[in-house]
Image (cartoon, grey):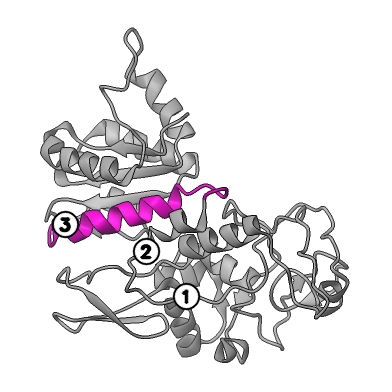
Amino acid sequence: MAASVFISYSSQNSKEVAQVLAALHRAGISYWKAPEMIPAGSNYAREIPQAISACKVFLLVLSEQSQQSIWVEKELDCAINCRKPIVPLKIGAGKMSELFRFYLNNVQVIDYTVNREKALLHLTQRLAILTAESGESDKEVMKARPKERGKTVTMAEADPNPDGATDSAHNSDISPMDKNGAVQLTQQQKQRMRINALRHNEVPVVCEKCGGELAQISRGSFRCKKCGNMMYDSYQKVRDYLEKNGPKPISEIAKMTGVPRASVEYFLREELLEIPRRSPVVLTCAGCGCAIRTGMLCVTCKEKRVKPASGDGKSRYRFIGTENRSDNL
């Protein structure tokens, strides 16, 4: 079985990397790391691209030394081309170079310099979420969140796109309904919902300023017990931005909030966001093709439990807003 996490680092940071490896081992997260995992008789240029392609997550140990490493730069470029989730762990106090700032635009960095223990906890939690398989038990998936954290956003129906891709996954069935008309979810669908909710609605674990413990003060909002700094989960960031600025293109939302585009699209598919009523841009119902403003199916197709028709799966929208729907969450 391929390793779950590819580790990109500078050999000058071997001490910090050893601490990261110990944390991954304790968390039961498999990893691939050069040079010890390169088979005898092979070479870097052959094995590294294959390992990156086979992994689920790309872990970048970010430091002044790694930013100067030509191998780390090549590995990061390969990970981006392979569309791998990138998790940067900053282990030095130096500034990020222009090149790496460009590469890591809108990617949340875990700071290892303030509180190492909490940073490693945050790291293993995020990696556990990103490497979780859809067949894992709910108990295994929920280990990736601290017990004291609050709820994630409310999901609508079972996520038809378990791999977290940005398309509309037109080949999925709609869940059957019971005699009262309520959607019946299979165990696998429930697992996929939880995994996708954790992947796309990232909840802060420690304060980004001082590394202190966070207390949840409302849905999606957290305050540091030590310095009072406010932090928000991904959905709350998007919602706050839209309420202040009105409907905006998804690319602009992702740029201004730091929330990945895939997460914004996920919130729209899950009916947590919607297109304004007077917008000329609309979604297309996957069942009958009529215009809708949120989700994947119109009300009629939901009631008929229509299987979405096959299609190219490309998103057909640019602008989204919260309007009244978000107030009912």
Left or right placement of residue 118 versus residue 264 in this view? left
Residue marked by disc 1: 235
Task: State the residue at coordinates (57%, 58%).
Answer: 191
- Badge 3 crowding class, 10 Å Cα cut-off, few under 14, some 14 to 19, many 20 or more, is few
Whether label 1 touches label 2, CB < 8 Å: no
Q: Is residue 225 left or right of residue 24?
A: left
Up-down: is 197 above or below 128?
below
Helix, strand or loop for disc 2: loop
Which residue is at a point 57% across and 50% down the rendered structure image?
134
Q: Image quadrant for the C terminus?
A: bottom right
- How far apart marks 1 and 3 lie (CA) works out to 27 Å
Compute the Cα span from label 3 to label 2: 16 Å
Label 3 residue SS: helix
First in residue order: circle 3 vs circle 2: 3
- Packing grade of label 1 (10 A; few <14, some 14-19, many >=20) is many
Where's residue 209, x and y in %?
18, 71
> Identity of the amino acid at label 1?
Tyr
- According to the image, label 3 marks what residue? 117
> Magenta region, mostly helix, strand or loop?
helix
Residue 308 found in image quarter:
bottom right
The residue identified by callout 2 is 145
Give the class, few, some or many, for how many residues have Cα within 10 Å of label 2's Cα (few <14, many ≥20).
some
Picture residue at 11% right of the left edge, 38% below the top: 15
Determine which of the numbered discs, if any, sits on residue 310 in the image: none
Which residue sits at x=34%, y=69%? 147
- Judge whether 299 appears above or below 144 on screen: below
x and y, in percent, of residue 261 in the image: 51, 63
The boundaries of the magenta stretch are 112-136
Which tag is nearer the camera, tag 1 or tag 3?
A: 3
Which mark sits nearer the N-terminus, 1 or 2? Answer: 2
The amino acid on which the numbered mark 2 sits, given as a three-letter code, is: Arg
Asked if labels 2 and 3 touch by Cβ distance under 8 angstroms, the answer is: no
